[in-house]
Structures are given as structure tokens and as C-alpha cells.
Image (tube, coloured by chain):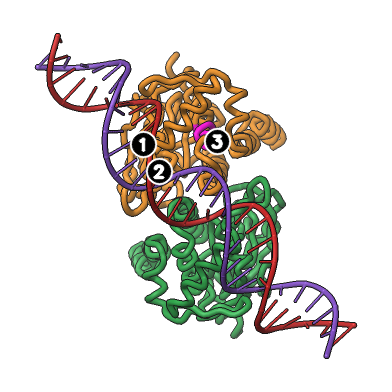
Chain colours: A orange, B green, C purple, D red
DNA sequence: TTATCTCTGTGTGCCAGCGTACAGACCTCG
DNA sequence: CGAGGTCTGTACGCTGGCACACAGAGATAA
């Protein structure tokens, strides 16, 4: 089954599961095409499904009184949307919207909970992922408090590129302003600065990363910090350890 | 045993457990006196114990490169310090320090994990608490991004008062600046403004809340929002529901 | 009492980001 | 081809918080 083979290597959370449990989950997933800026979940709404992104990414946005808001988390193929379910809560505190279009696997919430009960491996994976997500939210909090727009924008672009698995993707200045919690004008300034430095190029929403290293230099240290956290707790090395653990048990 | 009777009504997380499991946990806890500004855990350090605050409170602080930092969470008698353990991780991403002095119950991490495995009720409680904590971190992120110092300070004072269960507590401007991620001077300005409005009074670190309602009006909406989240997911009403659930089962 | 340390208050210049407004370039569709 | 919508660039005055510096008042200990 080529499809299943394809996807089980692309969502890393699923990929880290023992084959049997992974197949059981995949059998209950349906592939869905996520479109840019689609809203998957509103704050306070029931969570009906969980999503495992493949090459798409999903933003977690905290609403605030008024029209302001702030992205606090970003979910790509390293994770899952629908964490509240694993915590025994059936609603989400966040607005979840598609940040870069692409493929994801969707699974019914009740079915997911049923599988979660059966699979200790899945519990373990999700727990670790939750730890990383919390770290990310906290890091983003400090970042958005202290760092200037240009550095935050650079970080955002890098994180999105990592999750889109592509050098170019679609995103407008208005959308970025919404995510970063700044004015659109602020994004325009920062973006044109990055473009002048030949780190990126864009035209009416189509952004291309030209110089990844340069962009990393322009980004705040949060990008590196976050990446290290991911590597450390969800990365390849850990997977090796995990295999060893299994071998010993 | 008067001590055990006293404490089991004061940490709400423990109080929500069935008597048998609560007693088992309490038997393995030791009471500790937490002193102002004591550091319980540094980022990246091993988590050796979990803490259930009684009338003390503990801050979770995200460190950033340089000397800057930001408080992202606050733990009082509604919760527990040591969440990473429940996620299968033995270190914390945060600096945990005592924000208001008082009593807490401390338990060995390994013993806690052992009990956690045995007690479905404890798992349930901690899961819900974790959900609330995540909401709080995200709320704080947006708050510190958008709201002015004076409103944030008011919020902070209210949250601390709630957890200290007392109208006055000890905290200096420097400490507050550290928590709020601003300059000490900024705190001095905001605090003297609140004092001019007769909402609080302070002298060399001893703060007293004079007008709680006024302070709530001066605080950003985040305070109310957060309180509602707590009530909703950890509060009394939920406890009632919980009792009903038990009765039906 | 005196020296020292801690805590709080004030002042000055600076800057990033804000709110608002407007204009030009580009795209799409009738 | 023209009309209307979308995306991006620029300008202007404003303000909250920044860095830095200094001063005075209260606490503490010799």
C-alpha cells in the first residue's frame, strides 16, 4: 500500500510508533488537503478530530480581547493538532488555522482516544511532544516580548520552511502581522529589509527563501534554541535511544 | 492526624482525589517551608521532586539569552510543580522560584511517578491541570506582548494575592521587573501610580492590597479570563460534576 | 553613630512600534 | 479593456518602554 508507506515516514510522531500500532492508527486516518488560512478549530469549540500534518503546518493562535492575537505555537509533521483530547478536555483554548497548505492525516477524536488508551507507545510519544510544545509556547512568549519584528519574522520564515519542506510558500504581510501580533506596516518594513539583504524574495504573497544561513543569522536565537529542543526530545538521536531501550527490554 | 487533615484541604489538586489515594500520597509527602526567591529548579536541571503548594506560590520563568527573562506561569495551591515528570521527561525547561513564601508539600519524583501509575484519578487531575497551565502560559504570552506595565502589574498582584491567601506579601520592584520582563524603573512608575490611586500600598518590599475591586479594574482582562479558565476546569463546579460522575459509575 | 547596603523615586534622551492615511502596482473578472 | 479587489510601500505624529545616571530614604551592622 504505497500511500500508507509514504505517509508513515512523513509524520514523525506516527513514524516513531511500533509498526503494528502505527498501522492501526493509519487505518483509521483519512488524508485531507489543508488550504491556506482555513480555520480548523475556534477557541472554546469542541475538538472533533486530531490532525497529523504531513507537509502542511498549523498555527495555534491565542485570541485576546479586541482584534489582537498572537501565534503561540506551530505544528508540523513533528506533531499533532488536538492535544486537549489527550488531556481529557474536549475543547481547545486556541484558534487553529492552516499556515501552510498541504497534506495532513485526520482521525476521529473518539477513535483516537480509543487507540490512545491501547497504545503506551503513543502515550509516550504524545507526552514528549507535549513537553516540547509547552517549551515552544513559553519560548514564543519571551520572544514576542523582547525581540524586534525583523528577527521574529526571520524566525517565523525559517520555522515555516522547516515544516513546509519547501523553499517557497504562500503568505501575505497581513497574515504575518496577525501571527506576529504587529501591524501590517511593521511586517512590510521588516520583509523589505530582509529582501534588500537578499535573504528572501516575495511577490504578492509568494515567499521564497534565498539564503537560509543568512536568514538564520538575521533571526533571533529563539530559532536555534527551539530547533535544539525539538532535536533533543523528538529528534533522530532520541529515536536511536528509543530503539535501544526497546532492544534492552 | 491533624496535620494531614489540614493539608489535604489546602492543596486543591490533592483535595480532589479520592480519600484513599490522597492519603497514600500524603504519607509520602514532607512539608517544606519555601522562602522568598529561593530557586527550586534551574532550566535543564534534573527534576528530583514535585511540590504541592499550600499557601506558597512558585513562578515559572523562561530564561532568554542575556539577562532578560519572563514569568510564564504561576503555581499555587491549585496545582503542582514538576509537570515534566508526568510527561516522561526528567528535566524542566523553566526556572522555578518561590514567589511568595509559605508552606508546600514535597514528594520524591520516583515515588510520585509510582503513585501516578497506580492512580487514574491523579492522572485525570494532572491532565486537566496541565491543560489549564498551557492556557495560562499562552495567555501570559499575549498579555506581556500587548498590555502596558501598570495593567500587567495589577494582574500580577491579584494572582499572587489569590495564591498567597493574604492581603499582603513581600516582593520588591526589582523582583517584579524580573517577572514582568521590564526595567525596575517601569515597575516603580506603575507601582507608584497604583499607590496614588489607593489600590495598593507598599514600603520596601512589603505590599498590601487595599482595594481589590479597584485593582481588578486596573488590571488587564487577562486576570478575569484566567480566573474563569481555572474555575471552569479546576473549580468547585467541576468538582461537583466529578462527584456526580463518581456517583453514577 | 557611622558606614554600608537595599529599596524606591526622578530625569533625560532615544527608539521601536503604534494608529492612521494614502498611493501605486498587480491580479481577476466581467 | 476597464472596474474593483488585493497586496505592498511610504509618510507623519505619538507613546510606552528602553538605557543610563543619580539621589534620597530606610535598614543593618560595626
In the rendering, at what x and y percent does residue B129 appear? 48, 59
The answer to whether residue A102 of the structure is visible from this angle is: no
In the rendering, at what x and y percent does residue B101 appear? 63, 74
Q: Residues within 10 Å of mark 3 (few under 14, many from 20)?
A: many
Going from N to C along the chain, the mark reached first, 3 or 2, is 2
Tell me which segment is drawn in magenta. A152-156
Judge from the rendering whether residue A42 lies leftward or rightward of residue A161; answer left or right: left
Quadrant of the frame with the C terminus of chain A: top right
Q: Which residue is mark 1?
A: A97
**Tag 2–tag 1 contact (CB < 8 Å):** yes
Going from N to C along the chain, the mark reached first, 1 or 3, is 1
Residue B38: name its quadrant: bottom right
Q: Residue at x 40, y 69 (%)?
A: B218
Mark on residue A61?
2
Mark on residue B178?
none
Q: Which residue is mark 3?
A: A151
Residue B172: name its quadrant: bottom right
Judge from the rendering whether residue B153 lies leftward or rightward of residue C1; answer left or right: left
Secondary structure category for the residue under label 3: helix
Q: Residues within 10 Å of mark 2 (few under 14, many from 20)?
A: many
Going from N to C along the chain, the mark reached first, 2 or 1, is 2
Amino acid at each position: 500500500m504505497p500511500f500508507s508507506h509514504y505517509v508513515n515516514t512523513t509524520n514523525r510522531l506516527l513514524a516513531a510508533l511500533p509498526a503494528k500500532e502505527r498501522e492501526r492508527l493509519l487505518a483509521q486516518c483519512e488524508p485531507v488537503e489543508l488550504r491556506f488560512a482555513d480555520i480548523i478549530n475556534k477557541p472554546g469549540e469542541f475538538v472533533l478530530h486530531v490532525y497529523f500534518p504531513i507537509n502542511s503546518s498549523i498555527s495555534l493562535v491565542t485570541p485576546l480581547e479586541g482584534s489582537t492575537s498572537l501565534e503561540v505555537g506551530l505544528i508540523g509533521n513533528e506533531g499533532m493538532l488536538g492535544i486537549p483530547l489527550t488531556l481529557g478536555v474536549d475543547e481547545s483554548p486556541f484558534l487553529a488555522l492552516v499556515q501552510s497548505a498541504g497534506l495532513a492525516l485526520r482521525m476521529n477524536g473518539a477513535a483516537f482516544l480509543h487507540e490512545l488508551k491501547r497504545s503506551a507507545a503513543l502515550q509516550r510519544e504524545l507526552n514528549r511532544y507535549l513537553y516540547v510544545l509547552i517549551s515552544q509556547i513559553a519560548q514564543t512568549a519571551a520572544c514576542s516580548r523582547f525581540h524586534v519584528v525583523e528577527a521574529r519574522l526571520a524566525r517565523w520564515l525559517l520555522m515555516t520552511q522547516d515544516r513546509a519542506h519547501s523553499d517557497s510558500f504562500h503568505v501575505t504581510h497581513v497574515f504575518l502581522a496577525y501571527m506576529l501580533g504587529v501591524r501590517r506596516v511593521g511586517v512590510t518594513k521588516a520583509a523589505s529589509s530582509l529582501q534588500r539583504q537578499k535573504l528572501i524574495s516575495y511577490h504578492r504573497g509568494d515567499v521564497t527563501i534565498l539564503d537560509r544561513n543568512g536568514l538564520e543569522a538575521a533571526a533571533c536565537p529563539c530559532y536555534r534554541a527551539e530547533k535544539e529542543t525539538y532535536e533533543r526530545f523528538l529528534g533522530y538521536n532520541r529515536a536511536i535511544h528509543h530503539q535501544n531501550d526497546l532492544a534492552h527490554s
